[in-house]
Amino acid sequence: MPIPVAVLTHAAGPHLDAYLAGLAASSEVGEVSIADPSGSVFAAAQKTLGPKLKATGKDAAALLREAKPKMALVTMEAVLAPPAIDAALEQGCHVLAEKPACVRASDFEPLVRKAEGKHLHLMLAFANRLKPEAREAQRLVREGRLGKLYGIEIHLVADQTRLKSPSYRQNWFAQKARAGGGHLTWLGIHWLDMALFITGAEVEAVAGFSGNVGGQPMDVEDSNAAALRFTNGMFGTMTSGYYLDRGYHQHLKLWGEKGWLEMDQQAEVILKWYSTAEPKVSGVQNYAPPKEPSGYTPFVHECARAAAGLQAPPVTGREGLRVLDAIYAFYEAAKTGQTKSVARK
């Protein structure tokens, strides 16, 4: 039976159009109610959701009490998200939240504990986990095709062009007090999570540099160069920044005792690997991902299925917290010039 869902948002809620489209398309989602203090998103929601839209209101707490949703989708600027997530959990809702959902990891940790105590899912919007190539890479690693993992390189570079727009710089994600950070909390976070998803490892210690190399008038970073040590003994590096005039450069490379793996979103062959674990298979192997729906629509669907008790969640609150812990520890390491340990929780 389709579950009722509440959307807690505000004017210009991040990725709201994509989330509404995902709710509209998911067969597991029934009635949708929307809380927005500004009231500015209701017309667009009606257009996208059609008959699925049940109610709208400006007071999130009242809407949660009246609509009694099974899942709450929280898409807000980071500094505003924790109280909204907490309110949804108090009402017994599973939660899908836009990342980073906090401006410090210590604000997210009690939410994870509350969700676990109530046996509720708290799922950060790490939609890249559903990419077929990411799941295939995870399978190869978990089956031992690379053997013991030695090293990883994580690379996500976007355009510097957006930062030159005054209107862009006025958005919450370009202001540290509202976003918690810059490129790493907004974009790099996806690929750090994907690295942990594929390898099954956690970040144990971080060091590096973070700053504004492009010189645009904003107080969030446009550049990160991180060194990472993982719980499985693996070392890694991560480049996360706004450097290009347009588009993205996105790749992840992984090396182990029995071979290597490369996932490159810009390459003709998105996933390729080499392994000595199977003597009968030689040379570099390629994987062509199927043409499946991508982005937030399938992720919303899987979160709704998890909230309905039909499957495990695509990401747990504890997994989300580990990514946030690593990111905010890295910011502290870059600020102090000292390597920082990442507490295991």
Image: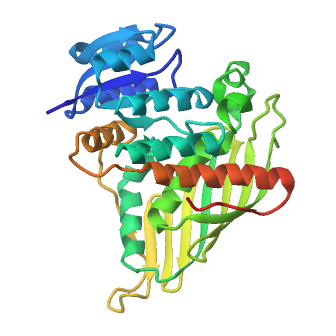
Residue 294 appears in the picture as rendered: yes
Q: Which residue is drawn at 50% across and 40% down?
A: 111
Q: Where is residue 299 in the image (x, y as percent from the top left)?
A: 35, 42
The answer to whether 40 appears left or right of 70 in the picture is right
Q: Is residue 332 above or below residue 187?
A: below
The answer to whether 143 appears left or right of 162 in the picture is left
Q: Is residue 4 above or below residue 120?
A: above
Q: In which quarter of the image is residue 275?
A: bottom left
Q: Quadrant of the N terminus?
A: top left
Taking depth in this image into account, of 338 and 131 the one nearest to the observer is 338
Q: Position of residue 218 (x, y in %)?
A: 79, 30
Q: Position of residue 332 (x, y in %)?
A: 77, 51
Taking depth in this image into account, of 315 and 150 the one nearest to the observer is 315
Q: In which quarter of the image is the C terminus?
A: bottom right
Q: Position of residue 267 (x, y in %)?
A: 50, 57
Q: Residue at x 37, y 28 (%)?
A: 91
Q: Which residue is drawn at 25% across and 42% down?
A: 305
Give the number of marks: 0
Residue 247 appears in the picture as rendered: no
